[in-house]
Image: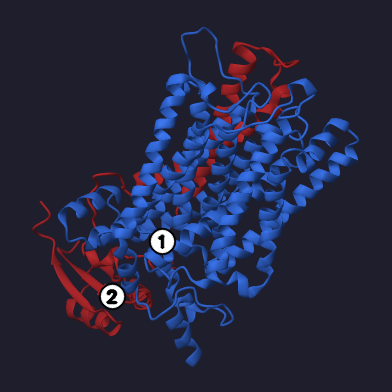
Chain colours: A red, B blue
Amino acid sequence: MSSKSLHVLFDDDDNLIDAVKEVVKNNIYINEVYTPFPVHGLDKAMKLKPTNISIATFIYGCIGFTVAILMMNYIMIVDWPQDIGGKPSFSFIENMPAFVPVIFELTVFFAAHLMVITFYLRSRLWPFKKAENPNPATTDDKFLIDMETGPNISKTKTMLKKLGAISIEVINNDQDEK
Amino acid sequence: MSSHYEAPIRKPLILGDKSYHDVSNDIARPVETPPDKDWWIAFSIAMAAFLWGVGCMAYTLGTGIGVWGLNKTVGWAWDITNFVWWVGIGHAGTLISAVLLLFRQKWRMGINRSAEAMTIFSVIQAGLFPIIHMGRPWLAYWMFPIPNQFGSLWVNFNSPLLWDIFAISTYLTVSLVFWWTGLLPDFAMIRDRAVDPFRKKIYSLISFGWSGRAKDWQRFEEVSLVLAGLATPLVLSVHTIVSFDFATSVIPGWHTTIFPPYFVAGAIFSGFAMVQTLLIIMRKVSRLESYITIQHIEMMNIVIMITGSIVGCAYITELFIAWYSGVEYEQYAFLNRATGPYWWAYFLMMSCNVVSPQIMWVKKIRTNIIWSFVISIVVNIGMWFERFVIIVTSLHRDYLPSSWSMFSPTFIDIGIFIGTIGFFFVLFLLYARSFPVVAQAEVKSILKSSGENYKKLRDKK
């Protein structure tokens, strides 16, 4: 790891994508890209792996489904079966239709909430968390690539300038690292 | 530019010559400027109504449900009417943000934030009614299946009222996280441009440290899509389950199998009408005409027209099935509904919900702001009467003519209803001044494809 890195600012998302593609082609490592809105195709250009959060959500939904069934089976059938309105509750399968709404709701409840909690934890989002975007304009209208300098700093700079970078800042990381 | 292509036949969704920075400025303006006199007047009226409602609620809880107009024949009236009305209004928000997201409707981006806010605020109002009706609201937690010291005393999972508890709580909490997750980038935008240190602190706190990393956006989009996929059946299930409160009973006029789809259509209908009412005012007051355009209003009017027609079909089907069933009690319930002492309520329901939206077939009317506003109010009134008609007219003349009676609300009934309207507007007015009311990050992502200036640029080529 070199001790220096570049903060390259763009004011257009198309230029950003082109620049990211070029940087990746030149085998220069991109630490992070900060954008004010979801730029389509950016994850592919950066060669980010697709997220697995939907698979996790499916599992969370299955957990909610199971919890709902176990809970209602225990409460209504096992622990205290009652004859409500001439419809005795001594068998889960015969009483199941009445349980469908709650099974559905709890499936959604578990899937949605656990997914959002997973997202917040994985992306490190919670109250009192300090924002980490190096330039406040990246939530407004600017796009920033935080990248390594590459073998030749001035060559990288000219390449980025040509691709539409509006400013390039050299960051010295030595002070930060212990 | 070619990657932002959109068919030229599609009208622009963002009007004017806007850059990304202009979008930030326009959305942040209501948050960064102090509210004007009109806002304070509206807020004071809403607050007064809310406090009046709180007084009526306190009186109800201190004295008992006897202060309402209920009698032994009509045991359910305004409380459940108001509950269903508010839940229904709460359906448009998630529908706009979830169903329209799945259908890739870009016009949702101008209105989804406010519609979701409206959803959450109106579900809060809805939730108040069953809780007050419990009589001892501090024991409301007994509705949850928690182990307790009363022996094996559990809640009854066969009861639609309990299904409702699960449906409404799931709906409220899932809508809330859906809304908040979408708000994070927009809060971050306000945080990063804030000059006032106090404002900066507040928006840092509520933006959860959003930084806009590429990976965060990737997850954000996946989460939005999956949440939309989960919320779509959820929306349909919630009002289905609300309709089960009636449909699983044995009261003529209530136990009809058409209720679930009919209630869902009615909910979307009334919800869109309320979004229309709120946004027509908001786009003017907050100067958001570039983002909530006439086209948005027209689209919502078309949804109102279609769902109004579905509701109309349901009304007529109900009448037909009552006749066709050959059950005299069922037949009488509907005959009485339309021609009995509450004929005027039925007439209001029919004219407001079935007839009035039909004029939206005329393009001139559905693109006219005044007409749209008037119709949206009319629909809101009509949908309140729909619930009143279903609930009270089915009850007031039951099997024993000796126990037939009428329902008249007391000033407490009216006061609590007015109080919830006040509470709703208190929340919405505060929201309009402290939250980014348009999902600006999403709007920026369609600016190049659907912005007026970019469309013109492309046409010139």
Chain under disc 2: A
Q: Going 56% across and 22% down the picture, which residue do you hit?
A: A71
Per the rendering, the mark at residue A10 is 2
Q: Where is mark 1, residue-wise?
A: B439
Mark 1 closeness class: few <14, some 14–19, many ≥20 residues within 10 Å? many
Q: Is residue B204 left or right of residue B96?
A: left
Three-letter code, disc 1: Ala
Residue B360 in sight in this render:
yes
Q: Is residue B72 above or below residue B13?
A: above
- Across and down, in percent, residue A105 comes to 57, 36
Residue B435 in sight in this render:
no
- Across and down, in percent, residue B333 comes to 79, 35
- Across and down, in percent, residue B389 comes to 68, 40
Q: Nearer the viewer, mark 2 or mark 1?
A: 1
Is B173 or B371 nearer to us in this picture?
B371
Is B196 or B40 nearer to us in this picture?
B40
